[in-house]
Amino acid sequence: MGRDVSPKIDPSRVREHETFELDGVDISGHWNRMFEQRVIFDYDVAQLDRVTDLDGGESMGWCYQCSQCIGVCPVDHVGDYGPRKIFRKLQVGMDFFTSDDLWLCTTCANCLRVCPKEVDMLQIMPAARKEAVLEGAVPAELQDVFEKTARYGNPLGKNPKRRIAWTKGLEVDVPLVSELGRKVDVLWWVSDYPSYHPRGMEASRSLARVLTKLGIDFAILGAEERHDGDSMLRAGEQGLFEMLADQNIEALNSYEFDVLLTTDPHAYNAFVHEYPERGGNYNVEHYARFLADRIGDLNLSEDVLSTVTFHDPCYLGRHNGEYDAPRDLIEALPGANFVEMWRNKQNGYCCGGGGGGMWLDGLAAEHQSMRLSEKRVLEAVETGADTLCVVCPYEVSRFEDAVKSTNNDGALVVRDISELLAEAMGLSTA
Ligand code: SF4
Ligand code: SF4
């Protein structure tokens, strides 16, 4: 049966027959609706068209409302969200570009994993947010971070000269590549939170001790390092991303190194997927993989008497396929017991920090029953674990706040894998 399903159909032509026979089969009553498309074309598709017309927004129009995405969207688990719901709201006239829905997606990629139509929020969200950025319609808390990052090169608004503060007083040497004046095996891209946030700084000190004990020839950039820009790009600030990427590439390309070692999965993602087309081509490794490949040399001899669970960062796991390295490291910890949360690996739950969510907690709170990080902490506690292991610098601060706000202080501690490894190696973790 040939039928016109284009939006140009005249709704007045469409009617439901009381009885209808098709090829000898009685398809009376509501079954007719499968063959005579009715109400849906009454809707004005202008708002949907505004999204699908964007470069990167096309796939929003491919949704056929199957709802697979809703079951896995972390935001829907604490609120009312997901691609299917956004599509439906666009059908009935939502202006996406001024809606809070534009900012709630964390670009976690779980919907894309299950969507049979490949509706791609990782393309749609940056494309639509870019329009809002150009119009100046950005939530104030995020705009503040954009401005700090543009001015200081980091979203915390810290003095670039303080990037190396965490190395002061450390018993191991953390050289600046500019002062070494030679090629190094490993250039460590420390990132912002590991340089400035108190708990991130502790994790950085542990990783410096571990690298030193391994005998790795490494150095850092110090004040020459700027925010990698990945989260700014997902949040729609393409111009800021491009400025940061070009500055970082200029700094990196002035030194010789074999491996660019990243602490932050978002930086890893940018270096692997975004920097090459701007002239930044590096042999990039995330520190979990780098250390997992050297497990035999770590000399893990001290018991870590903890029950440990692990949170997969979206930008290491789903975005870049690395699930094994952190687990291999945890399972190698002497005395530790590893337990999985029920949502793990490909279906891992998002901490809420991706896609600009790191700086949108205020807006999210208006639409969610709890923060995603709080939901995740409750899932970690459910496993009976006393330690939540992380390998992303966004997460230590997010989860530590969530441990407090869910009254789990004393029941669960959040520790970077480098801290757990340092303890197992008999090194200081202070
Ligand atoms: S899974 Fe894809 S096609 Fe199905 S409702 Fe969600 S966005 Fe639409
Ligand atoms: S990318 Fe993640 S947060 Fe965004 S809509 Fe999809 S599942 Fe939800």
Image: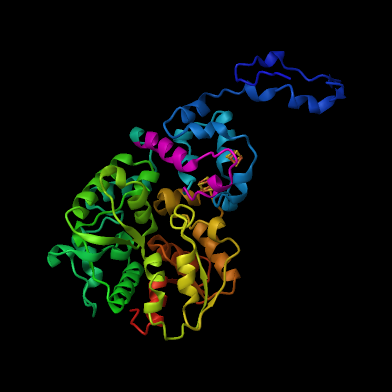
Left or right placement of residue 19 versus residue 139 in this view: right
Q: Residue at x 36, y 69 (%)?
A: 199
User: Quick check: can you spot residue 251?
Assistant: yes
Left or right placement of residue 428 versus residue 153 in this view: right
Q: Position of residue 112 (x, y in %)?
A: 53, 45
Residue 123 belongs to the span the image colors magenta: yes
Could you tell me which quadrant the C terminus lies in?
A: bottom left
Q: Is residue 349 above or below residue 294?
A: above
Question: What colour scheme governs how the chains and residues are painted in the rendered image of this protein?
Answer: rainbow
Residue 384 belongs to the span the image colors magenta: no
Helix, strand or loop: magenta stretch:
helix
Q: Is residue 126 above or below residue 151?
A: above
Q: Position of residue 247 (x, y in %)?
A: 21, 48
The one nearer the camera, 160 or 315, is 315
Q: Is residue 273 above or below residue 9?
A: below
Q: Position of residue 95 (x, y in %)?
A: 49, 31
Q: Which residues are magenta?
A: 107-133
User: Quick check: can you spot residue 371?
Assistant: no
Which image quadrant is residue 90 in?
Answer: top right
Left or right placement of residue 27 versus residue 429 in this view: right
Could you tell me which quadrant the N terminus lies in?
A: top right
Count of numbered circles on the image: 0
The one nearer the camera, 191 or 273, is 273
Displayed-image quarter of ligand 1: top right
Q: Position of residue 363 (x, y in %)?
A: 46, 48
Left or right placement of residue 241 versus residue 339 in this view: left
Q: Residue at x 21, y 61 (%)?
A: 221
Q: Is residue 220 above or below residue 139?
A: below
